[in-house]
């Protein structure tokens, strides 16, 4: 059972992306916001969640439901 931040970190690492690279792809000015999301200290906006779902090709349920594992 993984939380949102852990899932995002796993997806980012599966694709071999650094926080800075992911921030650039998602058009975020600072990678520290992504670091806070991965650490569970911050929540992404709906807009950012949609961008991540599209980038990582995962559903909303897969990303947000702690009981669902990533494929």
Image (spheres, rainbow, N blue to C red):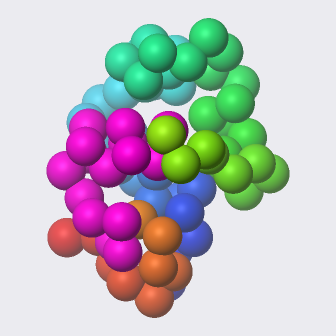
Q: Residue at x 61, y 34 (%)?
A: 34
**In this picture, residue 8 sits left or right of residue 70:** right
Q: Quadrant of residue 5?
A: bottom right
Reply above or below: 11 against 35: below
Residue shown at 71% from the left, 25% from the top: 32
Give the residue drawn at x 45%, y 88%.
67
Q: Nearer the viewer, residue 50 or 23?
A: 50
- Which residue is at a point 76% across and 48% down the rendered structure image? 42
For residue 58, what is the image quadrant? bottom left
Q: Position of residue 13 (x, y in %)?
A: 37, 40
**Does 39 appear above or below 34?**
below
Residue stretch in magenta = 48-62
Point out the image quarter for the C terminus.
Answer: bottom left
- Res 39 visible: no
Q: Is residue 63 left or right of residue 5?
A: left
Outermost residue, right direction?
41
């Amino acid at each position: 059972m993984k939380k949102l931040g852990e899932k995002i970190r796993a997806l980012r690492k599966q694709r071999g992306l650094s926080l800075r690279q992911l921030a650039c792809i998602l058009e975020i000015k600072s990678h520290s916001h992504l670091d806070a999301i991965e650490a569970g200290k911050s929540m992404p906006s709906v807009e950012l969640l949609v961008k991540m779902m599209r980038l990582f090709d995962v559903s909303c349920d897969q990303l947000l439901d702690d009981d669902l594992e990533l494929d």
